[in-house]
Amino acid sequence: MSCALLLLLMSWALAMRTGAAVEIQRPRGVPLSSEQFYEENKPFTCLDGFSTISFDRVNDDYCDCRDGSDEPGTAACPNGSFHCTNAGFRPAFIPSSRINDGICDCCDTTDEYNSGATCQNTCREMGRKERESLQIMAEITKEGFMLKQQLIHEAKRGQEDKQGKLTELQGSKKDLEEKVEALRTVKETAEDPEKEAKERHLKAWGEQKELIRMEKDKTRMAEAFLELDDDADGYVSVAELQSHLELDPDSDGSLTETETQVRCLPSQENNFYHTSKLQGCSPFGEIRRFESKIGDLHDSCRSNEKVWAGGLWMTTGCMNLEKEIGFDFGPSAEFAYLYSQCYELSTSEYIYRLCPFNRVSQKPKFGGSETNLGLWGQWAGPEDSLYSVMKYDHGQGCWQGPNRSTTVKLTCGKETVVTSTSEPSRCEYLMEFTTPAVCQEPASLDEVLQGHTEL
Amino acid sequence: MCLYLVLVLSVFLSIIQAVDRSNFKTCDQSAFCSRQRAMKPGQSSYRALLETLELSDSHLTVQLLNNNNKVLLLLELYRLQGNMTRVKINELKPVKPRYEVPDVLITDPPTELMSVVAQDEHRVVLSLGGEDWRLILSAQPFRLDIMEGPQVLLSLNSRGLLAFEQLRIQGEEAEEEVDQPGMWEETFKTHADTKPNGPSSISLDFSLPGVEHVYGIPEHADGLRLKNTDGGDPYRLYNLDVFQYELFNPMALYGAVPVLLSHNTHRTMGLFWLNAAETWVDVSSGQGSSEVPQTDVRWISESGIIDVFIMLGPRPNDVFTQYASLTGTQAFPPLSSLAYHQCRWNYNDQEDVSAVDQGFDEHDIPYDFIWLDIEHTDGKRYFTWDNNKFPQPKDMLQGLLDKRRKMVTIVDPHIKVDSSYKIHTEIRSRGYYIKNKDGGDYEGWCWPGNAGYPDFTNPEMRKWWASMFAYGQYEGSMENLYTWNDMNEPSVFNGPEVTMHKDALHGPWEHRDVHNLYGFYVQMATAEGQIQRSGGLERPFVLTRAFFAGSQRYGAVWTGDNAAEWGHLKMSIPMCLSLGLVGISFCGADVGGFFKTPSAELLVRWYQAGAYQPFFRAHAHLDTPRREPWLFGPDNTALIREAVRQRYTLLPYWYLQFYHAQRTGQPVMRPLWVEYPEDIATFSIDDEFLIALQPGEDDALAQTNSPPVSSGVTAYLPGNGEVWYDVHTFQRHDGAQNLSIPVTMSSIPVFQRGGSIICRKNRVRRSSSCMENDPYTLYVALDSQGNAEGELYIDDGHTFKHETDKQFIHRRLSFTANSLSSSDLSPDSQFPSASWVEQVNILGAQKPDAVTLTTTDGGESSVEFAFDPDTAVLTLRKPGMNAGVNWTLHLR
């Protein structure tokens, strides 16, 4: 081996002076798969077929072929390609302009054979590391893919339930609207105590919530609420949802949108906004709030409000459901579980929040108001993996710039979590997000490893 | 209809987004300018008192009397070596000294003997050497005429506009003097400017008979040829941070070089008005007496003295030599700084830097420098790093170093007032800050909020500043980290005209006296710091926005905050040409445009243009979308890659030009008239230029206003009898014709002049350092006689060893009588180079029978060749000789 190397170096040096070169076996930089084109001591035809040269002009450090195929092992051609075997790691092609430029590119050091650069052969180490990380990735993919199957299953059931719920809701909405009209009259006669009651209500709210929750089982609700109870997504664990709701004080965008349609009175709008902030806007949260608040029908003001909220929820519920059913949650609805959820990432300056299919926002850690970084736009991955990228746009406008927007890159992971955020361009955010929903069916680990350790 | 709408909209946008003119003074709003300009041409009130005339070996002095107020001035006349005359006028007895600009002249200019040829009571005639060069001093009214034989080359005060406001003490003025508004105090917007010694401005007129074309006095966003200022504002020289500057406007910009060149077919001359205060220049061209065209120029400055150098040429290159003998030549930059620079406000963090670096490799586009703007610092405290975004600057720099690449960080001269910031506390405790008029440290608003401004006019301060660049002082710095000085006009967000109050104090001098010098000193001190940190071994690289005469000695200059508009792309040529004429060769404009967002086409065209301008850096505003070269689709990426690669292949040529620029003071990027001074057709061309002798015409530009598809441009190829070769197709064209060139998105019309030899390195690597040992390809473009000449310069690319140890190769390549040979231009220097000659292309050749190579050791070998009869290009295959030795190639 050292002999061959010596010979090569000599021949290269010789080539520089006289133009004559001696080559051995497979010319430097030629992959095994192309070896047959480089037959020693026979004229070489450039791989594009454009010209034929004598074999001693292969790798003689002068570019003869337009396609660079005569100089795979020197930097002579601008478009040449050098093959590193990288035994122990993965073979690679590098542009032949990177040969002998003083920078170690191939882990087997073969690209720097005459530059004086001292390169270490790192192929084994890299191979080991890659195998390790592939192994980890494979495990993640495997587990992630299993989780994904579960998500698909749940999504399918949820979808059916929701369709049914929507139909029912649409029916009961009308009833409730009538009730609202009746209560509006009551409310108008009770405007004075309202303010006081509202304050009282706010104070007592926390306690009531618990109280009402306990009452839920024993207290008979109004007919409308019975229906609601039945419709609730009961099979989703309450505790689980609530833990997310706490993180989610203000995904009230759709509600406020509806408010304008229902024409809330201003004084109530405030209150409503506040309560909704406490409770969140997931259908489940809405039901909770509605149930709890309807518990006290004697307070005319509050009951008024409650029915308002009920009406609101009915409308909202319908709209939400319609909207939700209309979303593209992926080929098997595997992303459906993200709907109505929010995920946060805290950086040194900001807390970023991603509420999939809804919005992305940013809140300064040390005071200051929240900024909308974009509303759900569409799936925006490349053609072959459309569901790998989410695009949120039409966020808050930037001075002298565009409206803020966020690109969310999805990668396979066991957990559903935001792993990083950045702002590569002013007001254009980039978020990395892991979820089992993008995990692909894993090839068997052996296959993966084999594919990368060939040679 | 649609087009119409777009047009209207763009006009509307340009109105609301362009510069807020009300932030900046017009001549009328500047008390001294308006006072001086109110004075109309007529009989001068000054009389030369010939009885006071004294003539010494080196100069002549004579007193001038103002007949109106009896104030006496002292005129000094010097005949300088190299065909220059210096005229100085100061008050004979000022109430306190007036400012004379230091540090700009590289030496006290050597004088030559001046002798009186004739004298009577009306005039004195002095000899300026030669047979018939005369300087005539007329007494009443005072005027000076410089003559060659019977011909007046230039007159001073011929229009009687000499005015010299004497310093005074308030309340002690002579009775006949009437105070005019703004003499003791003036207010602009909310800013008051106090003048403890009253008015101090100066003015003088120059007449140039026979001259229709004048150039220079940068920096203005205007055409190469100066316009008539009659009826408008004069050209203004006052270093200012102008937000979104307008094109075709005499408003002041970031830098000022008070040098004006005049040119006609017989003679090129220069006027260097050495004054660092706010200055206005009126230019008026028209018919003089006896139907001869004439250009009148009038200089007005707010303070200081009249100190003017008249450079008499007569050829353009003589003027460059003369000016270089006064203020020095372009610093010879590190080779890598001539390569491509990638900048953005801002690369956000280390990961971002590494991703961009990686992006260049992935897309196989070379680059040498990546830049970090202000956001890299800890709260705009220069010399520091943002700990979250750049926690390991040395790791980052090492990563770049491993790829043989470099970085620039910004270091601005405004210093955050913060008692926990070392730079600030040191400057404060050493008393190095500029003071306000009441003696406290001057403070103004800039990027960090409240900031102080170090007094760079103080040599002690500069020494201290330089020491801050030591590796031990500037934490996280390494040898591949260089510097960018921005905002050094200085920019003061809440100051008058976004700059410093004129009554702020630099020791005994007012800011008014030194304003235009501030940026010059900042770059000087920074460059010195970089030299010192390497123990005097490594050449510095410092980019500055503000500049003055002499700034060429310290590094590169760019045209500031331009915009992503075709007009700005086009303007980059005359702006850099104007700078080149006054010594500053290392000039470039932000590729892509700083403000706003370029279309892909504009960006590509800008890369194509920038690749042929001296300083080649892409830059973008914080609020614009990312625009790294690969973000506009594969086609555009390929076009940009090709443009950048063309730059890299020509690096040996650029480097040679800068070597020459440093040695001779000749500009690198030249207007056509400089090389074809007798061809009137070239005098107003500023959309084409020459890189030394080879024109690169940027006509990305000629077509700039007719977007996307343009079928062609017309370019003027200069030189009667000259031959030009298209560098891409090798097609041959005759000179002195308007050539219509078909244009596609990929074409960059560049021509090599017949008679020249250019050495390229066609192997494009990741960075210029990687190309160090690569072989050369020679392009021998034959002239109509079948001859060609060129040079090759090689050194280590980054140290001063070419100067200190004579470590370089400088060779002459010459093709004549069918032989191409390389001979040593500097036999006493040497440098070991591994580079060799891999190919020779002879353009305009005939097919030989044989080609042989002879080397000095007597060896003779035959060289293989190929001849293309369609293009008449003879290609010699791999002659293989080392670039540093003598050899001859014979065509038989």
Image: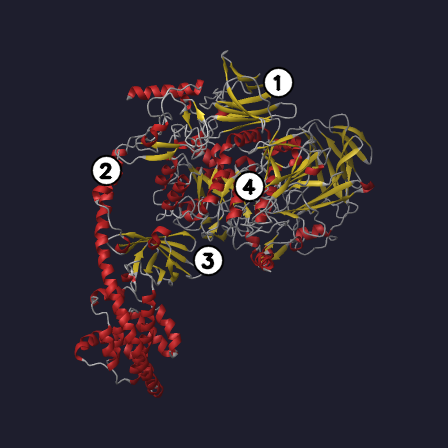
Q: Which of labels 4 and 1 is toward the front?
A: 1
Q: Horizontal and vertical percent for residue B350? A: 37, 45
| Kind of residue at badge 1 | Ala
The earlier-in-sequence mark between 4 and 1 is 4
| Kind of residue at badge 4 | Ala
The chain to which mark 2 is attached is A
Position of residue A341 relative to residue B59, above or below, is below
Marks 3 and 4 sit apart, C-alpha to C-alpha, by: 28 Å
Marks 2 and 4 sit apart, C-alpha to C-alpha, by: 48 Å
Q: Which residue is mark 3?
A: A402
The foreground one among B697 and A65 is A65
Q: Which residue is mark 1?
A: B817
The earlier-in-sequence mark between 2 and 3 is 2
Left or right? Give the position of B188 relative to B375: right
**Are there few (<14), some (14-19), or many (20+) residues within 10 Å of tag 2?**
some
Q: Secondary structure at mark 2?
A: helix
Q: Is residue B41 visible?
A: yes
Q: Secondary structure at mark 3?
A: loop
Q: Which of labels 3 and 1 is toward the front?
A: 1
The chain to which mark 1 is attached is B
Q: Which residue is mark 2?
A: A128
**Are there few (<14), some (14-19), or many (20+) residues within 10 Å of tag 3?**
some
- At a point 21% along the width and 66% down the height, the residue shown is A236
Q: Horizontal and vertical percent for residue B291? A: 81, 41
Q: Secondary structure at mark 1?
A: loop
Q: Quadrant of residue A1?
A: top left
- At a point 62% along the width and 52% down the height, the residue shown is B195
